[in-house]
Image: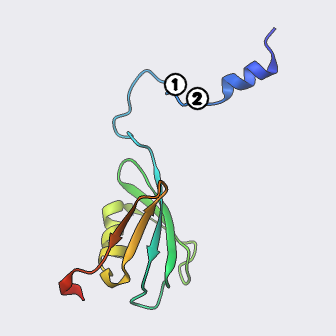
Amino acid sequence: MTSKTTELEDLIASSKPTTDFEVPWAPLGAKRFNLVRQNDETGVSGRGIIAQGCLFADGTAAMQWRCPPAASDVVVKKWETILDIHVRQHPKNRTLIVWEDGKHELYEPKPQDE
């Protein structure tokens, strides 16, 4: 007779893969991030954590705005497109991308942008 505890333990996911093949397109899985602006050049989004999101292994990202007027709107695009539109076009905002593991990337103006 199998106990309920053993059955439950069998259902709990382990850290080991359950397949015998590798998934080359998803080596790290998804990573969460916060988009933090130190300045607000346009006066629209404000400062601080203005968006949060998830970067998927294939380079697609989903980002949700936390500030009005677009609060709760979700943007799904390629990661580089999100950076180009919402970060690199506004270098004076001194935007930080803060990853779930604590690592961060600072986008600040180049001398010609100041």
Figure check: 18 above or below 82: above
The residue positioned 45% from the left and 91% from the top of the image is: 43
| 28 horizontally vs 47: left or right | left
Q: Dot 1, how many residues are within 10 Å of its Cα: few (below 14), some (14-19), or many (20+)?
A: few
Q: Dot 2, how many residues are within 10 Å of its Cα: few (below 14), some (14-19), or many (20+)?
A: few
For this orientation, the residue located farthest to the top is: 1
Do tag 2 and tag 1 residues touch (Cβ < 8 Å)?
yes
The amino acid pointed to by label 1 is Thr
In front of the other: 111 or 20:
111
Q: Please name the residue that numbered disc 1 is placed on.
A: 18
Figure check: 101 above or below 45: above
The amino acid pointed to by label 2 is Ser
Figure check: 101 above or below 64: above
In front of the other: 93 or 71:
93
The residue positioned 44% from the left and 78% from the top of the image is: 37
The dot on residue 14 is: 2
**Element marked by disc 2:** loop
**Element marked by disc 1:** loop
Q: x and y percent of residue 54 in the render?
A: 47, 57
Q: x and y percent of residue 71 in the render?
A: 57, 77
Q: x and y percent of residue 78 in the render?
A: 35, 60
